[in-house]
C-alpha cells in the first residue's frame, strides 16, 4: 500500500502508514510494563490525596480509583482492537467516522490536552531537579521571581533541563520509549516496596489515617454527602486516562496479536492503579506519625528523607516522570500533529511541536491558577474526550462491524471522504455530546464569573465523560443508520 499511495495523497506518511509484520513486536508483557510505568506517576499518586481530602476513607479512595480504571479499561480495549487489527494510529482510525478532513478535529482535541499534560509532568520533573539540588546544597536554591513568569531563574532552568532530557527520546522514537518503559517498570515496583518498608520502620507501623473512617459517616463533617463526592471523583479518575482511551491504537498497532494487547492492558492498568492508590494512602498515613501532618506530595516527602535515601528517591521519581510523560503525553499528540499535514509533519516533528507548546503553555500557571486543578482539568477535558470515544466505538463496532477498508482511509476522494472530507453526523454527535457539559464546566472553572448555573447542569457536569459518551454514541448511531457503504474486506494483520 505504501508504494500505491505514498506519492498520490496528502493523507499518508511513513509514520501514519499501517504497521508491517516486522514492526509488530509488542507482547503482553510490554503492554503491562507500559501501564505499570505510566500508572506509577506523581499525579496518579496525588489523586488518592484529593479523594481523602474530599472526605473519603482510605478504603473508599482505593476502591474509587480501582473502579474508575476498570471502567476506562473497556473503551481502551474496544478502541485498541482497531489498532491491532489494521496497524493504524488513532488519528487515522478517526477518519472512518469523522471523515478524512474531519478527523483533524478529534486529533487536535486530543493533542492540545496532551500538550497540557506534557507540560505539567515536565514541570513536576523540573521541580524534582530543583528539590534535589536544594538538598545537595543544604538549602533552597531560590532567587527572585522573573517578571511575567512567576517562577525564579533556578526553577526555569531546572524545568528546561528536564525538558531537554526528554527531548532525547523524541529524537529516538517509539522503540526507545518501549525499552525505557520495559526496563523501568520493575524498578518502580521495587521502589514502592522499599518506600513502604521505610515508612513502616520509621513510623513503627502504618498510622491512623488508614483506620480513620470517612467523613461521610453519621456525625462526620460531611455526613450523608458520599454520593455527591463519589460521582465527580469517579468521573475525574476516568478522565485521568480518557486521553489514552482514545489514542491507545497508537500503541496497540505494534501488538503481535489481539491477545497481547487485551491481556497486557487488563493486567497492567486497574490493579497497579489500585495498588498505587493504596500505597499513597499507607505512606501518607505514616507521614502523619512521622511529621505531624499528612504529606501527599512524594517530592516533598523525598526531600525530608536523609542521606542517600533522598538522592535515590528523587532519581527514581525523575526516571519515572520521564517514562510516564513520553508514553502518556508525547506519542499521541506526535501522531495527531502529524495527521494534520502528513507530508510536512512527521512523527518526530509532531513530537517537537508537542514539546514546544508544552513550554508556551507555562504549566506552572495551570497548576497555580486553577484551585483543585485535578477536578477542573480532568473533568473538564473528559467532557471533550467522552463524546469522541462514543463516536469511535459506535462507528467501529455497530456501523462498520469492525470492517475497515484501510487503503480508503488514506484517499482524499475515497469512501471516508463523505462531504468534502467531513462526516457531519460525527461532528454533530460530538457537539451535542459536549454542549450539556459547558455550563457546569464554566461554573467549576470560573465560579465568580458564572455563579448562577442551575443544579441540573452542575449535576450533569459531575458525570461529564459518561454523559458525553452516551449522548454522542446515541446521536451518531441514529444519524448513521442505513447510511454506510460496506467496507471491502482489506487483508488484516493477525
Image (tube, rainbow, N blue to C red):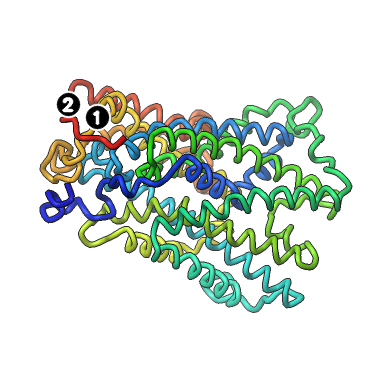
Q: Which mark is residue 403?
A: 1
Disc 2: which residue: 486
The location of residue 43, given as percent across then percent down, is 59, 50
In the rendered structure, the answer to whether residue 292 lies left or right of residue 132 reads: right
Compared to residue 177, the image places residue 414 above or below, namely above
Disc 2 + disc 1, Cβ < 8 Å:
yes
Q: Which of 124 and 364 is in front in this view?
A: 124
Callout 1: helix, strand or loop? loop
For residue 138, which quarter of the picture? bottom right
User: Measuring 32% from the left and 47% from the top, which residue is drawn there?
Assistant: 107
Regarding residue 435, the answer to whether it shows in the image is no
The residue sitting at 50% across, 68% down in the picture is: 165
CA separation in Å, label 2 and label 1:
8 Å
Residue 78 located left or right of residue 310: left
Depth order, front residue of 486/237: 486
Up the image or down, 112 lies above or below 397; here it is below
Q: In front: 164, or 68?
A: 164
Which residue is found at the position 71% from the left and 35% from the top? Answer: 56
Label annotation for residue 368:
none
| Residue 52 sits in quarter | top right
Q: Position of residue 26 (x, y in %)?
A: 42, 45
**Reading the chain from its start, which is encountered first: label 2 or label 1?**
1
From the viewer's perspective, tell me whether residue 218 is left or right of residue 461.
Answer: right
99 above or below 484? Answer: below
Q: Which residue extends farthest right?
A: 204
Q: Which residue sits furthest front?
A: 22
Amino acid at each position: 500500500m505504501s508504494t500505491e499511495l505514498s506519492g498520490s495523497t496528502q493523507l499518508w506518511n511513513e509514520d501514519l502508514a499501517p504497521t508491517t509484520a516486522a514492526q509488530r513486536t509488542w507482547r503482553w508483557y510490554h503492554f503491562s510494563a507500559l501501564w505499570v510505568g505510566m500508572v506509577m506517576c506523581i499525579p496518579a499518586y496525588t489523586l488518592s490525596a484529593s479523594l481523602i481530602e474530599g472526605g473519603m476513607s482510605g478504603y473508599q479512595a482505593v476502591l474509587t480509583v480501582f473502579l474508575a480504571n476498570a471502567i476506562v479499561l473497556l473503551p481502551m480495549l474496544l478502541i485498541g482492537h482497531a489498532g491491532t487489527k489494521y496497524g493504524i494510529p488513532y488519528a487515522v482510525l478517526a477518519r472512518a467516522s469523522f471523515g478524512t478532513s474531519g478527523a483533524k478535529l478529534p486529533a487536535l482535541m486530543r493533542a492540545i490536552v496532551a500538550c497540557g499534560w506534557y507540560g505539567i509532568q515536565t514541570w513536576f520533573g523540573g521541580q524534582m531537579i530543583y528539590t534535589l539540588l536544594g538538598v545537595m546544597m543544604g538549602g533552597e536554591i531560590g532567587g527572585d521571581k522573573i517578571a511575567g513568569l512567576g517562577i525564579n531563574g533556578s526553577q526555569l532552568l531546572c524545568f528546561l533541563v528536564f525538558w531537554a532530557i526528554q527531548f532525547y527520546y523524541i529524537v529516538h522514537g517509539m522503540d526507545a520509549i518501549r525499552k525505557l518503559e520495559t526496563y523501568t517498570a520493575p524498578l518502580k515496583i521495587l521502589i514502592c516496596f522499599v518506600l513502604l518498608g521505610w515508612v513502616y520502620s520509621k513510623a513503627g507501623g502504618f498510622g491512623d489515617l488508614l483506620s480513620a473512617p470517612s467523613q461521610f459517616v453519621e456525625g462526620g463533617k460531611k455526613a450523608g454527602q458520599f454520593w455527591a463526592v463519589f460521582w465527580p471523583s469517579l468521573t475525574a479518575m476516568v478522565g485521568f486516562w480518557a486521553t489514552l482511551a482514545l489514542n491507545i491504537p497508537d500503541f496497540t498497532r505494534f501488538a503481535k496479536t489481539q491477545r497481547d494487547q487485551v491481556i497486557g492492558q487488563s493486567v497492567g492498568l486497574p490493579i497497579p492503579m489500585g495498588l498505587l492508590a493504596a500505597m499513597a494512602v499507607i505512606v501518607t498515613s505514616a507521614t502523619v506519625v512521622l511529621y505531624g501532618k499528612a504529606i501527599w506530595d512524594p517530592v516533598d516527602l523525598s526531600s525530608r528523607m536523609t542521606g542517600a535515601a533522598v538522592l535515590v528517591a528523587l532519581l527514581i521519581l525523575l526516571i519515572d516522570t520521564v517514562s510516564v510523560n513520553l508514553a502518556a503525553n508525547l506519542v499521541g499528540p506526535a501522531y495527531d500533529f502529524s495527521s494534520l499535514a502528513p507530508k510536512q509533519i512527521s512523527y518526530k516533528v509532531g513530537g517537537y511541536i508537542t514539546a514546544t507548546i508544552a513550554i508556551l503553555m507555562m504549566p506552572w500557571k495551570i497548576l497555580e491558577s486553577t484551585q483543585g486543578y485535578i477536578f477542573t482539568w480532568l473533568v473538564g477535558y473528559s467532557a471533550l474526550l467522552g463524546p469522541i470515544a462514543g463516536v469511535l466505538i459506535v462507528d467501529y463496532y455497530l456501523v462498520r462491524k469492525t470492517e475497515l477498508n484501510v487503503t480508503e482511509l488514506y484517499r482524499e476522494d475515497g469512501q471516508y471522504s463523505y462531504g468534502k472530507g467531513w462526516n457531519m453526523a460525527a461532528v454533530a454527535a460530538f457537539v451535542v455530546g459536549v454542549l450539556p457539559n459547558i455550563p457546569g464546566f464554566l461554573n467549576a472553572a470560573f465560579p465568580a464569573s458564572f455563579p448562577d448555573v442551575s443544579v441540573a447542569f452542575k449535576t450533569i457536569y459531575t458525570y461529564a465523560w459518561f454523559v458525553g459518551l452516551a449522548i454522542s454514541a446515541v446521536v451518531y448511531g441514529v444519524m448513521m443508520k442505513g447510511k454506510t457503504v460496506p467496507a471491502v474486506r482489506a487483508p488484516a494483520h493477525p
